[in-house]
Image: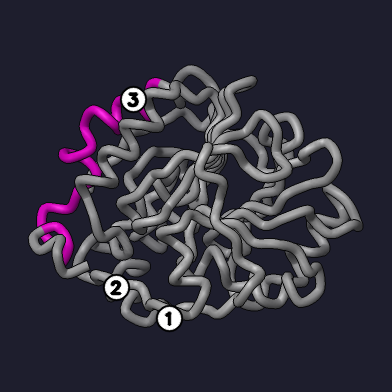
Amino acid sequence: MDKIEVSGEETVPLDAISAGVGGVRILFVNVFAVNGGSGWVLIDAGLSGSAGRIRNWARDHFSAAPPTAIVLTHAHFDHIGALEALCEEWDVPVYAHRDELPYVTGERAYPPPDPSVGGGMMARMSALYPRAPIEMGGRVRELPADGTVPFLAGWRWIHTPGHTAGHISLFRELDRTLIVGDAFCTTKQESFFAVASQSPELHGPPAYFTTDWDAARDSVQRLAALRPVIVAPGHGRPMAGRETTEALGELAARFDEVARPAHGRYVEHPRLA
């Protein structure tokens, strides 16, 4: 798969992405927090075993108090790994799209990954990645149908399926900040070496876990239409500036050419998902 290059000058530090928005990278995935004025909200929950690091980072950069809520972009293992441990200590509600709820209420496992796509070590190893659901019981709540984000005035969630059925991204119109989840990446997530170097470039969603490529293309086009100025992805460096906006537009326009694999389990047989 190809890439959309972006200047390294467009990257921004994780701890100062935009007003009230910060993040931390844990191995190969990013976790974000947003200050909502009367409290803060955690966006995703990283890898298993990272609860202590997330808590320490949040205490140092946001507050010693627990967040008012945790919002999930989706429930893949690298975005909910520390969720149970964090909730045991914080005792806060967890919000997700209704189509993502089965994966956090113990009802359904994700479809198998496709190690054949991407041509990199991260893709080849994907058969080993956890995909079983977790059981969060009554703690999980459906995101409001009107697109508002609980406890975060000025933000809205946008349904961006493709990578998963209930994937969402979050957008703040005031400064055009976009928290992407895995709708697209700013690194080639299939490649171990790209993940290690974090070279700034736009790619589609992690291919080995993406099960609906038409929906994934439509989601990137929907996000590009927002013309975000600041982009905070689940994988890769946050980016900001006009070149980032233009590069996302190019990714949306050329998605089938540069992001969709030529072959693969869900490319050729989408009904297997």
Q: Nearer the viewer, mark 2 or mark 3?
A: 2
Q: Which residues are drawn in magenta? A: 246-267
Location of residue 80 in the rendering, given as x and y in whole percent from the top left corner: 57, 68
Q: Which residue is mark 1?
A: 132
Q: Residues within 10 Å of mark 2 (few under 14, many from 20)?
A: some
Q: Is residue 65 left or right of residue 71?
A: right
Name the secondary structure under disc 2: loop
Q: Residue at x 67, y 57 (%)?
A: 70
Q: Which mark is residue 111?
A: 2
Q: Residue at x 56, y 46 (%)?
A: 144
Q: Is residue 191 left or right of residue 155?
A: left
Specify the quadrant that holds the C terminus: bottom left
Location of residue 32 in the rendering, given as x and y in whole percent from the top left corner: 65, 49
Dot 2 amino acid type: Pro
Dot 3 amino acid type: Gly
Q: Which residue is mark 3?
A: 249
From the image, give the main secondary structure of the stretch colored magenta: helix
Sequence-first disc among 2 and 1 = 2
Sequence-first disc among 3 and 1 = 1
State how far apart marks 2 and 3 are (Cα): 30 Å
- Tell me if I can see residue 264 in this picture: no
Q: Residues within 10 Å of mark 1 (few under 14, many from 20)?
A: some
In terms of depth relative to the viewer, which is nearer, 106 or 114?
Answer: 106
